[in-house]
Amino acid sequence: MSKIVGLLLVLLITFPAIGLVAVATLLSPAVASCSISGLVVGPIPESLTARSRDGHEVTLDRRQLTHAATIITVGAQTVGVGRPGVVVAIMAALTESTLQMLANSTAYPESTAYPNDGDGSDHDSLGLFQMRPDAGWGIVAELMDASYQARAFFGGPTGPTGGSPGGLLDIAGWHSLDPGVAAQAVEVSAYPDRYQNYQPVAEAILRALIARSSSVGAREDPRVPETTRVVFPLPPGTYNDTSSFGWRTDPFTGKRTFHEGSDLTAAGGTPILAIADGLVTFVGHNGGFGNLIIVEHRVGGDRVASYYAHMWDGGIHVVAGSSVAAGQHIGDVGSSGRSTGPHLHLEIHPGGPSHAPVNAIDWLTEHGAEGIDSGALVRAACVAPAS
């Protein structure tokens, strides 16, 4: 390892641009590795220009985009972050440091000995997210590392601060917050309204860095129709919402894990309905999902994928490549795969299969889905999780 580090230092001194790429490739998590959310960083462009919400033009160089790539990959490897959390993190880093790894020669002279993009002057703050050692974010050596700062910002059970100070995943209900408000909840800035301004820039960075490296299904099939309506996937009066999107105790391991779907318990054989007009893009057995159907839709012009899991053999009534209508009977409730009893595991992925899921019940409610049984959703707290 020491030889690798020595080589990288030579590269950084002799060929700064090449050195940055080498560091990102060999030492940073911003390499193609395990991605939970499907966000995989592709080739990093030399520069990117985008406009902030107030119309200000922001131009970022390869070095800044390499830091963004690190944030994206750490987020992709962290359960519960997904695309929304990555956007929040990039917004925060843009606001705090313009995506630069800043030393602080006044407060911490030793910080200048670490690879950095310049000298900051915000009190005793360091790095991409301007984190303070005295606030408990970490020691100087840790905070001068982009991947550590990203892990600290995301926080959660695997975060390095143990929840104090809290990262994004330690904030209850962060998914429902405006991204700028969520960023402020982590940063606790004296200027809380700054973060929203950088959301368009963060979205542009994410599109630029993952556009050429998304997983299967990234190219939208022209046959995917614009839907005429949105419906709930089970008939009213047939289900209870037992284990919705978010952190929970896994019924198999007993450990706290992030659940990316909504579990709707129902009697075996209960009809499963397509949530919108769409194109069936996957049918078959898929690991813990058991028997799975994936349907892709266009809702209000936006691409969306819906997942329907755990059907028994013989409980699937569509084939890949077929078109379906909203409310069409596509399968029957079962308990295949990683399941403790008959139920539908439903996931909604705005952007398509390669994008992170959101709270399916919230998404259906926000889109005015027909047939929602509000009583069943209210009763959810009284029923044990299914899987």
Image (cartoon, helix red, strand yellow):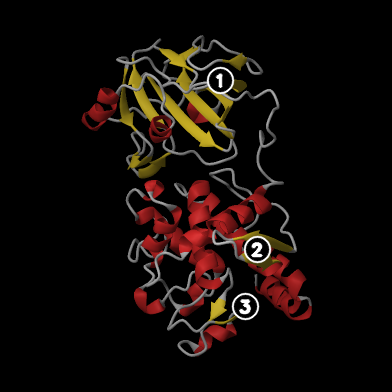
User: Which residue has dot 1 on it?
Assistant: 277
Any part of residue 27 in sight: no
Rate crowding at label 1 as few (under 14), some (14 to 19) or many (20 or more) other CA atoms within 10 Å.
Answer: many
Where 95 falls versus 220 (above or below)?
A: below
| Rendering coords of residue 377 (x, y %) | 29, 28
Where 85 falls versus 370 (above or below)?
A: below
Quadrant (top left, top right, bottom left, bottom right) of the N terminus: bottom right
Q: Amino acid at mark 2?
A: Leu
Q: Identify the residue at horizontal 34%, vertical 13% (top origin).
A: 267
User: Which residue has dot 3 on it?
Assistant: 117
Image mark for residue 65:
2
First in residue order: circle 2 vs circle 1:
2
Q: Identify the residue at horizontal 60%, vertical 20% (top origin).
A: 280
Rate crowding at label 3 as few (under 14), some (14 to 19) or many (20 or more) other CA atoms within 10 Å.
Answer: some
First in residue order: circle 1 vs circle 3:
3
Disc 2, disc 3: CB below 8 Å?
no
Marks 2/3: CA distance?
12 Å
